[in-house]
Amino acid sequence: MKVLVVGGGGREHAIIKKLKENQEIEKIYALPGNGGIAADATCVNIGATDLDGIVRFAGEHQIDYAVVAPDDPLVLGCVDALEAQGVPCFGPRSEAAIIEGSKVFSKNLMKKYGIPTAAYEVFTDAEKALEYIKTAPIPTVIKADGLALGKGVIIAQTREEAEEAVVAIMKDKKFGKSGNSIVVEEFLEGPEVSVLSFTDGKVVVPMISSMDHKRAGDNDTGLNTGGMGTVAPNPYYTEAVAQECMERIFLPTIRAMNAEGRIFKGCLYFGLMITKDGPKVIEYNCRFGDPETQVVLPLLKSDLLTIMKATTDGTLADTPVEFFDKSAACVIMASKGYPVAYEKGYEITIPEEIADCVFVAGAKKEDGRLLTSGGRVLGVTAIADSLKEAIDASYDMVEQIHFDNAFYRRDIGARALKAKAED
Ligand code: AMP
Ligand code: GLY
């Protein structure tokens, strides 16, 4: 069997490593992949949003199954294009990927179907948004409608900040067309939980829960990033919370998408906040999270390809999805200056014995050497019987890895450990 994976970050590396456990797969291609993924798959220099190039490649290489991992090709219709060529895919079609592609769509969906989320208003006119902000409760949250590389959300602590955000998004078009509409929403408080789920449009099977660490600095200070580390499971996601989420959020979302004629198949990611009024949806993603995948998939006991194919075929209800009863921690090693400006091209050294625990996000191979090429460079994952052991083992490995200008948060999992202690 020949499998194609679209994407080239740490998440895709984790997906590919897991897929490789299936003996039926003889070849995995990564488009475009990266210098680290090249150790586990054949990387081909076709960009993740080059839909024509991807479809052509799939045809030329008799691809049997494709996994489309990142948000932008999904929203652009990569699955639709591959399916039209007869290639079965893991991932939603464009009409369903809109659940991440448009915040206005997802907020309206939640309102229409009574799915708990922050109260909100939608604006397409900057002046009206500015008028509204004069009396809105502060802090307030401003979100660009479309995809914005994870940077389209501004938590404004003052009215001035809120005004600046509206001007930057709607007038200065900081995120381009993504800012034609905005959502202004209620600021929620509480611990955050990421729940990735498999769905075939009929049933929804949540994976083990996880916790992301979005800010660049220790103790959740500094700028928002794509994620500086993760742990799984998330101690705030208790049995009771899980049950409530299934009844009030997961199943209603699948049913809502069906009722809208937008059947979602693939990985639906629920970004949740556990507020004092119960769990609420902060965001939906139409894909695996990054770096959530780097802790969730290593804990998956069942075969990933079998589950993925079941989401495509609509047979998920009959497919076992089991996780190891263990904990995982992933520490992201980034380049100093991320998420703003950083240098690239530094050599990375990883001891052979731990290479299997390293998911490469931003590195290229040059003359046999692995060089940094992105802000987030590596995700170092450890699995252990307890969360504390997993965190310690992950930091132990981080200390054995070297590249110039490396930086990482020192407190990945600290909040989760504290929550467990208070349990
Ligand atoms: P997103 O890019 O949608 O994941 O949002 C980034 C982060 O902003 C989330 O992980 C939350 O920490 C925060 N956030 C988003 N919406 C809200 C909200 N309504 N209230 C409080 N924090 C929020
Ligand atoms: N880690 C958050 C995301 O993948 O959007």
Image (spheres, rainbow, N blue to C red):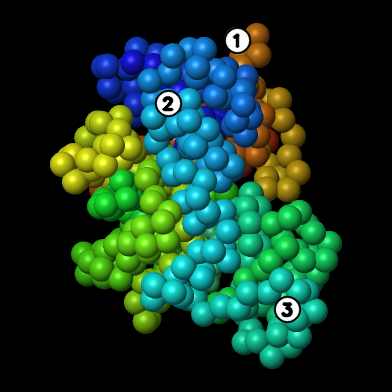
Q: Which amino acid does label 1 sit on?
A: Gly
Residue 367: quadrant of the picture: top right
Tag of residue 129 = 3
Q: Which amino acid does label 3 sit on?
A: Ala
Residue position marked by numbered label 2 in the rendering: 87
Dot 3 falls on a residue whose secondary structure is: helix
Query: Does the image show residue 98?
Result: yes
Question: Measured along the vertical axis of the image, is residue 33 above or below residue 335?
Answer: above
- Residue 152 in picture, x, y percent from top left: 65, 59
10 Å crowding of disc 3: few (<14), some (14-19), many (20+): many
10 Å crowding of disc 1: few (<14), some (14-19), many (20+): few
> In which quadrant is the C terminus drawn?
bottom left
Q: Along the horizontal axis of the image, is 379 left or right of 298? A: right
Question: Measured along the vertical axis of the image, is residue 251 above or below residue 128?
Answer: above
10 Å crowding of disc 2: few (<14), some (14-19), many (20+): some
Residue at mark 3 to residue at mark 1: CA–CA distance: 53 Å
The furthest residue to the right: 172
- Residue 397 in picture, x, y percent from top left: 43, 33
The furthest residue to the bottom: 135
Dot 2 falls on a residue whose secondary structure is: loop
